[in-house]
Amino acid sequence: MSPARRRVVITGVGVLAPGGVGVKNFWQLLADGRTATRRISLFDPSPFRSQVAAEVDFDPELAGLSPQQVRRMDRAAQFAVVAAREAVADSGLEFAALAAERTGVTIGTAVGATMGLDQEYRTVSDGGRLDLVDHTYAVPHLYGYLVPSSFATEVAWAVGAEGPCTVVSTGCTSGLDAVGHAAQVLREGAAEVMVAGATDAPISPITVACFDAIKATTPRNDDPQHASRPFDASRNGFVLGEGAAVFVLEELTSAQRRGARIYAEVAGHASRSNAFHMTGLRPDGREMAEAIRVALDEARVAGTDVDYINAHGSGTKQNDRHETAAFKRSLGEHAYRTPVSSIKSMVGHSLGAIGSIEIAASVLALTNDVVPPTANLHTADPECDLDYVPLTARDHRVDVVLSVGSGFGGFQSAMVLTDPFRWRA
Amino acid sequence: MSRAVVTGLGVAAPTGLGVERYWAATIAGHRGIRRLTRFDPSSYPAGLAGEIEGFDAAEHLPSRLLPQTDRMTRIALVSADWALADAGVRPEELAEYDGSVITASHSGGFEFGQNELRALWNRGGQYVSAYQSFAWFYAVNSGQISIRNGLRGPCSVVVSDTAGGLDALAQARREIRRGTRLVISGAVDASLCPWGWVAQLAGGRLSTADDPAGAYLPFDARARGHVPGEGGALLVIEDERHAVERSAPRIYGEIAGHASTMDPAPGVDRPPGLRRAIELALDDAGLAPPEIDVVFADAAGLPDLDRAEADAINQVFGAGGVPVTAPKTATGRLYSGAGPLDVAAALLALRDGVIPPTIGSSPAADYALDLVTRTRAVPLRAALVLARGVGGFNSAVVVRPFDPGTDRATRNRVTGTE
């Protein structure tokens, strides 16, 4: 029915993650199994239950942004633009020579400009005292904070894209879904190049307070470096993170024609909803398993061909058990033979951004034949009985990666990334 | 490729709750814009908005949902119920992953967020609601509608300012082509609270007029900004085969084409992207400009943006070459709800052979548009709906009546001759 399917590949990677700006620093952190979690320094966290986070040491001007860009952009937008520039430079594409009309942007974010909104609210409300907040104190770029599609605009302006541009905001699966969306746009032929990824900078008092209220984040304040403990029996909530990862996506044959470095093929992506609860998960992992099944099917990959699972691994009891069940349900016995790891143990949970940061980790696992570890995993939860690659990275041939995400709203997503040369479906 | 057809409409607009009330008011040219009542606007330079009247969430939703939802989510949940009822669909009868929800958002549950920010900064972190973690975020409407109706298919959320509502419909069509049978899609927005108002004022596009009749006048020499409003529309979009197989009570029409583009960055000397969005959407629908009988304009209500839109329309259709209307002059601009509401209006226009009016505007001659300012009865073959967003977003959707005869397999099924 359909002609030969257009195959979508990643030819450029840009990462801005806790522990170091840039792809190189990011991968070094993961390969070393070091953690970037620490006591929050972006504001005084002492009034809050959870006081740890994985922060990015980021100087926007040093990262190449102009004073005007710094002024008008929320931290999350700054992350996205810097990561997009790195991805484009890495791709070797001459963007000036590209047809702007055939270049698009999809940026994922869960909570948009929450940091800027939190700060600006304090100003216009006089520290929360005014109901009728005072417009005369509002900054001109407040509208860009109000609507997070400003992130897609900033990236489009930075790379000169005039094709289809949007933001995908599906909570904590945004980072997977944004790249999946961009791959669809390419397959449909509505663009030749997509700059896609995700960003979030949620480490602000309002975010910390709202996760405190539902005890989703860890109170392990006395030991920040070891606070993010996915799959460990002693885990007690996730650690908030921040960052961005952005990719250049294009069609395989045109990438080959220009001699591009091809990192990976975005071979399959699917999402399903649990229609169960805005924050709760049923322990059987049913909908995530279905998303995995459909993504594998789209990639024409059998479950038994998966070499590595990049887990959501947030470090909440319900998540770790939910996805362990989903892996067993979708991959059967093969789940027990497959290394599974959570990089959130090292870089925290940056909400909408983390899905793309995990795609970056997956792509680097493919190209390096190394599986990053789950840090801080000493004694696994007895109900989590898979191979979670504790503490140390592992040399392991990786041709097919499954990366999954799970988020508030009930969204469950799965992506299959393959090495298009070593792997033949 | 399977076609995406609209089989149900759920509308919540300042001019009326429910499809037929909205449509009757729209055809009659009733205005839903008034001085804000939700809060006292007298300290702000702008004070007019399109507020929804008479919406009591407790009449429609279980009480446990009320403390965890922003106003826009409550309106969205009820609009989704109406759309499903209109389509004659009982979601529990769908196979497990056959239905999904794909909405657009503009600013999330902003009023809910304001209340929690106030609690945080005025009283302390321990007073922040346990629901804040999801009640304000952009994905909330898709999540809540999915949960309420047991829809487990591929749900999503897009944000592209005021253009996002049309992009959501395009994403729904994309998922239908990938195998989902039914999608609730569109958008409902509301951020008529002081904090939302201040953020919108910062955007510099709000009309500061006091007179509701003279505040939002797109394509008029007196244009001086827009009036915002709340509401929007949720549509039931189905795979045509599914709609036909289940004998859907009605098929309003087909989402036949879509395209989205971005304007060049400031200072880049290249043409704006709206014309390209129109041409690509027509191509996608397989229609030539003369086959479009009405354009629902974005109608920004600011001279330079009105000029850019008129130029794009005239470049494609010729000066005055197609009737153009902006029924949103009656409701105000509903942010991401605007596009889906215009698509609903366009489908009703196709059904009834009538173009709803642009109210208030006296079209300036130099725009060279055939602006429909009085309800016009005329047979319509296809409609083009446009939406633009702050930051350069352009989106265009083409709708036309569903014609089973244009696809042999479907025709055979309809006529039972297979």
Image: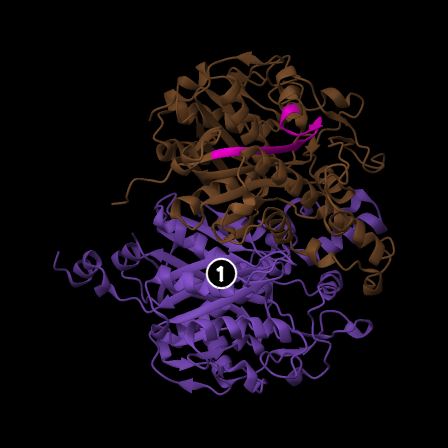
Disc 1 crowd rating (10 Å Cα; few below 14, some 14-19, many 20+) is many
Tell me where residue B56 sits by quadrant. bottom right
Residue B240 visible? The answer is: yes
Give the magenta range. Answer: A10-24
Depth check, front residue: A98 or A179: A98
Q: Is residue A15 magenta?
A: yes
A329 left or right of A31 in image: left
Tell me where residue B242 sits by quadrant. bottom left
Q: Position of residue B86 (x, y in %)?
A: 40, 65
- Residue B399 position (above or below residue A193): below
Kindly identify which residue carries mark 1.
B166
Chain bearing tag 1 is: B
Residue A283 visible? The answer is: no
Question: In the rendered image of this protein, which colour is used for chain B?
Answer: purple
The brown chain is: A
Residue at the image position 79 percent from the left and 54 percent from the top:
A121
A325 left or right of A198 in image: left
Predominant SS along the magenta part? strand
| Quarter occupied by the N terminus of chain A | top left
Q: Is residue B382 magenta?
A: no
- Residue B161 position (above or below residue A286): below
| Quarter occupied by the C terminus of chain A | top left
